[in-house]
Image: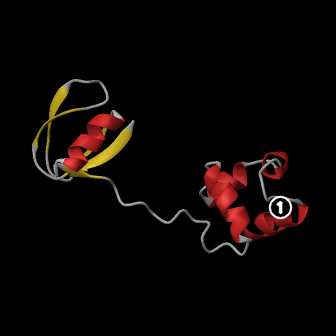
Amino acid sequence: MKRVIIDRPGRYNGASGQPRWMEAGDELQTQGWYADGLVNDGLAHYPAVESDGIDDLPIPTRAKNSLRETGLTTVAIISEATDDELLALKWIGETTLRQIRDAV
């Protein structure tokens, strides 16, 4: 499933597959291939990606990349992860774990 923002009013298929009227600026969640088609045809655009929240953390770049690759992309998500989960990641050792915990 992907989310898109409608740019041109019209009938669009949502996640249920049922067409519904959408206005410009409405958000639509639908199948990935359908969302890609809407974007490619200029009927919609993907929502702006907000800062992932980890760019400014004072931790090594390798650790940031490892966190991103595993979906730990926000401070809130990282805060919920256990120490064992973080230590299981590539490039995360005891020192980096301490840096992450101090930063969040």
Q: Quadrant of residue 48?
A: bottom left
Q: Which residue is mark 1?
A: 97
Quadrant where the C terminus is found in the figure: bottom right
Q: Quadrant of residue 55?
A: bottom right
Q: Residue at x 24, y 41 (%)?
A: 37
Q: Position of residue 40 (x, y in %)?
A: 22, 49
Q: Residue 68 versus residue 80: which sits nearer the camera?
A: 68
Q: Is residue 104 visible?
A: no
In the image, farthest residue toward the right:
94
Amino acid type indicated by mark 1: Leu
Q: Residue 103 versus residue 95: which sits nearer the camera?
A: 95
Q: Residue at x 65, y 61 (%)?
A: 65
Q: Position of residue 29 (x, y in %)?
A: 32, 38
On the picture, is 22 further left or further right than 96? left
Q: Is residue 73 visible?
A: yes
Q: Residue at x 88, y 66 (%)?
A: 95
Q: Residue at x 32, y 53 (%)?
A: 46
Q: Position of residue 3 (x, y in %)?
A: 34, 44
Quadrant where the N terminus is found in the figure: top left
